[in-house]
Image (cartoon, rainbow, N blue to C red):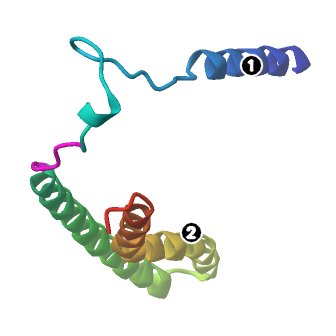
Amino acid sequence: MKKLTKIMSVLLIAVMLISVSSTVLAAVTGAVTPGDVTGADVSGIEGVTNVGNQIVTILTTIGIIASVIVLIVLGIKYMMGSAEEKAEYKKTMMPYVIGAALVFAASAIANILYNFLGNLGGNA
């Protein structure tokens, strides 16, 4: 077992060293002076942002509907179950509650991260 962990550690370190990348600045033709460098063209970003927002909204809605349906099913099974089944449902309830809370809060968390990272980049 120790030999396997050593081999896996060496392979993990090798993969990390190989995958290290660095920034490469290249010019298509001739030399580039600092005055030639301009900001990135961001004209198409609004369309991508709108599509991304629509996808997140759809996925969040589907997740909320699915979690409510699962809650209804678990509630009915809990009410109809025997004492042993009720104990089993109580065990599975905590992971469900955590998952449902994450689904309900996913769009808020994503929005907070988007605004925070946007402010870090100076895009506010």
Q: Main secondary structure of the magenta part?
A: loop
Residue 47, how many percent across, how many down? Answer: 9, 54
Q: Are marks 2 and 1 in contact (CB under 8 Å)?
A: no
Counting from the top left corner in percent of width and height, residue 69 is at 30, 75
Amino acid type of the residue that numbered disc 1 sits on in the rendered structure: Met
On the image, numbered disc 2 is attached to which residue? Answer: 95
Marks 2, 1: nearer the viewer = 1
Say which residue label 1 marks.
8
Q: Quadrant of residue 74?
A: bottom left
Of 9 and 37, the residue lying toward us: 37
Is residue 83 depicted above or below 8 in this figure? below
**Which residues make up the magenta segment?**
40-44
Quarter of the image containing the C terminus? bottom left
Quadrant where the N terminus sits is top right
Q: Residue at x 32, y 26 (%)?
A: 33
Question: What residue is at 28 percent from the left and 68 percent from the top?
Answer: 60
